[in-house]
Image (tube, helix red, strand yellow):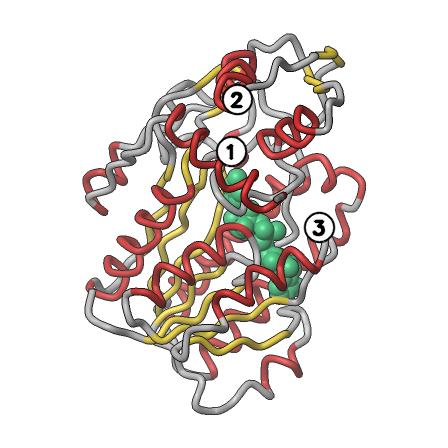
Amino acid sequence: MKPTTILVTGCSGFIGSNICLSLLKQGHTVFGIDNFDPNYPRQVKEQNNFLLLSYPNFTFCEADLTDQKALEVLPEKLRPEIVVHLAAKVGVRSSLKDPEGYFHTNLYGTECLLKWMLKRGIRKLVFASSSSVYGNTTESPFVETSDLSAPLSPYAATKIACEQINLTYHRQNGLDVVNLRFFTVYGPGQRPDLAIHKFLMAMRLGEVVVLYGDGNSTRDYTHVDDIVAGIESSVSYVLSHEKVYESINLGSGRPIALSQMIHILGKESGCTPEIVYSKQQPGDMENTFASIRKAEKLLGYHPGIPFQEGIRRFVAWFDAQKS
Ligand SMILES: NC(=O)c1ccc[n+]([C@@H]2O[C@H](COP(=O)([O-])OP(=O)(O)OC[C@H]3O[C@@H](n4cnc5c(N)ncnc54)[C@H](O)[C@@H]3O)[C@@H](O)[C@H]2O)c1
């Protein structure tokens, strides 16, 4: 991809900081927006930013997407070729406790961003959707044409609705869009509320690992480096095509059982997890399994990091942080 100018929302988060770093290393000009949502400590996000700010081709703006005035005062020169929209209230379980907050940030925030994009003449968007749009009734592997009428949580509902908002802007205003449905992303920088990070933290502290369900649920874990490659291919795809509206799965296509995940995590970290079983949590999907045919065909996406190797890298990152 030739050097371009990209706006990344949610740049200080897990996936945001990984994609920004990769784009900056390739010489792209990156503008990042984040409001340091308190879903996990601000300090972690500031640390992510710290590395990004060491690149002269990075500019950061602390702003809340739902604050239209804050968007309007962004420098006039800020006219990126494309927006990678990752900012959101995240997580299935916490969305059950705060649906209004999720609807406000994810729906109204997206609407504000798209309106701002049109005002600035920006017509290209890559949006972070989620495997959670598929719910529990979709046949495996999940294909993009599946029915999306049974979301299990407010979070999932916002991702479906955002895809629809994007579609409306595509039809009414000619916005070119790729919605990327990410499948359980893990790797360096992973959010502390996500299972792999939480479990390793518990093991290192000598605490019990609380496992929801019987261990047979499965997840299509996808390493963040594969996700970053998929986002970059999507950016190239949207920039080089006109009249685009696509929703595309980004997964590994290799589901792993929860019990197997804990076994591998224990092996790679040298810990023997003490597991306590608890009941399945409302909002959680039983299984996720991505069909990645469409991503292979349109984006040339080929996730290359085997799960055990990905976990090895995650453990190395985790231990380096803690020491
Ligand atoms: N991590 C996963 O497994 C996964 C899976 C599916 C989809 N996704 C999606 O990918 C995107 C990134 O997820 P992540 O795991 O990096 O989460 P994250 O919480 O680490 O990053 C999201 C960032 O958005 C910022 N943000 C929240 N509300 C904002 C607002 N109103 N204005 C500006 N910034 C705001 C947060 O401060 C945070 O830094 C999200 O849209 C998420 O729904 C993630």
What is the three-letter code of the residue carrying label 2?
Leu
- For this rendering, which residue is in front, 207 or 32? 207
Q: Residue at x 43, y 36 (%)?
A: 313
Left or right, residue 201 beside residue 85: right
> Nearest the camera: 191 or 214?
191
Whether label 2 touches label 1, CB < 8 Å:
yes
Q: Position of residue 265 (x, y in %)?
A: 53, 22
Residue located at (36% from left, 67% from top):
24
Query: What is the C-alpha distance between the residues marked 1 and 3?
Result: 20 Å
Judge: label 3 CB < 8 Å from ligand 1.
yes
Chain-order first, disc 2 or disc 1: 2
Q: Position of residue 256 (x, y in %)?
A: 45, 18
Residue 191 at x, y = what percent?
60, 44
Q: Which one is earlier in the sequence, the residue at label 1 or at label 3?
A: 3
In this rendering, the answer to whether 99 lies above or below 76 is above
Residue 315 seen in render = yes
Name the foreground residue: 255 vs 282: 255
Which quarter of the rendering shows the C terminus? top right
What residue is disc 3 on?
40
- What whole-number distance in Å separates the C-alpha atoms at marks 2 and 3? 23 Å
Q: Can residue 142 be seen in this snapshot?
A: no
Amino acid on which the number 3 mark rests in the picture: Tyr
Q: Residue 315, which numbered label? A: 1
Q: Determine crowd level at label 2: few under 14, some 14-19, many 20+ residues with C-alpha closer than 10 A.
A: many
SS state under label 2: helix
